[in-house]
Amino acid sequence: MRVLKFLSFLKSFSGKINNHNFFLRRNVIIIFYAFITVIVLTALFSACKSDAVGPSYTYKYDFNVWYYSDSHYFTDTVYASYYDVVMKDMTGGAGLPQYIKDNRIQITSPDLEIWVQCDNTEPGKRDALAYVQLWDTGSSGYDTIIINQQIPGMKFFGYFRKLLPSEYYVFEYAGFIGLKISVPDNYHAGITYSTAAGKKYGKGEYGSAPGDTLILKMFKCADQSPDQTPLAWKLKMKNVYKLFGERIPQTGFNLILRAIENLNSGLEYIKMIPASGGPKSLMEITSIDRFTNPTSNPPPDGLIDLIEGKTYMSETMDLIMPTLRPFSDDLMAAGVDTNYYFYEIYNARKLYVQTLPKTVYFMFTAYW
């Protein structure tokens, strides 16, 4: 009703300027009508979709499972190999196998440094060589990688700046980094660190002379892709999602994951997905609903488990899936219809993935 009254006002307004400049009148009307059209369509779209999760919320938004964060990386592929084990552990690391404990990144050690590429105008820049899958200092020296030529996607030499601790976080057992800043796609980034077993990787500012060339273990290269930089691509995580907003509300926040009901007819989303033995909860299949919120105790309650420092980071609004490839490997293990498998999320770049029909097969919905 208010929209109709406003449109009536526009008609009256246009009449008042009818005797003035024609082009002014035309442009004003075009702008106002375009503005109102956007508002009306947005309101209708929101109203149509809101019935899917119920009326008892103020804010709601949907986001696709292929639209993962571009700010999370493993420091080494070894961490990716046992990621699921670490993320499902609820003992704080005490119940993990010894080899995982030995590889734990020492996050309080002074040799933990993260560096990102910068230009020559950066006051604190340092010359650094970044190398993917850099070996530990005890295996051999780094002289050979310094003298060899640069290798795209594998080795890069240039200017880097050291990040402040407030610009990143590190998961010590899972061995991955969450960047709190935006790094251009064509920039490189690397790390120096030591493990609980005493292995050291790289040579950073700590323990180096001012003029030394730093040696970094590269986790991000320019234009990371599965075909051009396959090893670096394995370090890029595709299972962390950036939630929109400033902070996750302390109370009343809900997050669910649904699948399309029928792959061949319409966009009706459901929480249960066809699988062997009958329909199964998609959130339980992907291990994001194992507990009753806000506790860490079973049984599942139909909502995504938001465990601070484990499955989400409230400061950065990061939702962290507890399995590495939830929309392929987890579906296969549960005997889900093979047509739902979304391998492309993990094997192809977003530019290609977003063109596939599968992009609508799954949907996250946040509401509060």
Image: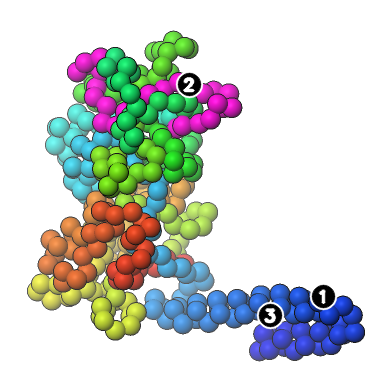
Residue 284: image location, x then y, percent: 22, 64
Quadrant of residue 264 within the rendered picture? bottom left
**Which residue does the image show at 36% across and 21% down from the upper left?**
215
Q: Is 300 situated above or below 167?
A: below
Disc 3 element = helix
Residue occupied by mark 1: 24
- Residue 72 or 317: which is nearer the viewer? 72
Disc 2, disc 1: CB below 8 Å? Answer: no
Magenta stretch containing residue 126, yes or no? yes
- Which image quadrant: the N terminus? bottom right
Quadrant of residue 289 within the rendered picture? bottom left
**Which residue does the image show at 41% across and 16% down from the upper left?**
213
Q: Which residue type carries mark 3?
A: Tyr
Residue 115: image location, x then y, percent: 43, 29
Residue 218 appears in the figure: yes
Q: Rounded to the nearest whole Å, what is the CA distance between mark 2 and mark 3? A: 54 Å
How crowded is the residue under tag 2: few (<14 C-alpha within 10 Å), some, or many (20+)?
A: many
Magenta stretch containing residue 190, yes or no? no
Q: Is 1 situated above or below 99?
A: below
Q: Earlier in the sequence, mark 2 or mark 1?
A: 1
**Which residue does the image show at 24% across and 22% down from the upper left?**
136
Residue occupied by mark 3: 33
Q: What is the span of residues highlighted in magenta in the rendered image? A: 116-142
Q: Rounded to the nearest whole Å, what is the CA distance between mark 2 and mark 1? A: 56 Å
The residue most toward the front is 149
Disc 2 element = strand
Q: Earlier in the sequence, mark 3 or mark 1?
A: 1
Q: Which residue type carries mark 1?
A: Leu
